[in-house]
Image (cartoon, grey):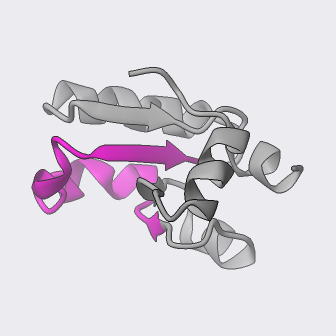
Amino acid sequence: MNDITPTELKERQQQNQAPVIIDVREPWEHEETRISGSQNIPLGELPAKLEELEGLKNQEVVVHCKGGGRSATAKALMQQHGFQNVRNLLGGITAYNAQ
């Protein structure tokens, strides 16, 4: 699945068609600024949480961080564990907030 642009994600949110959004930044970063409806699972905790996310394996999931690096790692990890439809938010929350 291709990654998602901030514009596409915002359009989907406005149409009430937002995918599941996972913020892989640290809790303090999530507290400072967040995408509405996102769930915070820091990248370091993600491997231990994958079992809890099992129900999302066939759903669209968008992962994001500050700029896209940590979320690219999260996307690869989730794909290795059978998540079919994981997309990285291009440019992270920095690009999302800039629009």
Magenta span of residues: 39-65
Residue 33, image x, y percentages: 73, 71
The residue positioned farthest toward the front in the image shown: 15
Could you tell me which quadrant the N terminus lies in? Answer: top left
Residue 46 painted magenta: yes
33, above or below 8, in the image: below
Could you tell me which residue is drawn at 56 percent across and 52 percent down? 12
Residue 57, image x, y percentages: 16, 43
Residue 3, image x, y percentages: 52, 27
91, above or below 43, in the image: above
48, above or below 86, in the image: below
Could you tell me which residue is drawn at 65 percent across and 50 percent down? 11
The residue positioned farthest toward the right in the image shown: 98
Residue 84 located left or right of residue 39: left
Could you tell me which residue is drawn at 63 percent across and 62 percent down? 14
Residue 8 painted magenta: no
Residue 13 located left or right of residue 42: right
Could you tell me which residue is drawn at 80 percent across and 43 percent down? 95
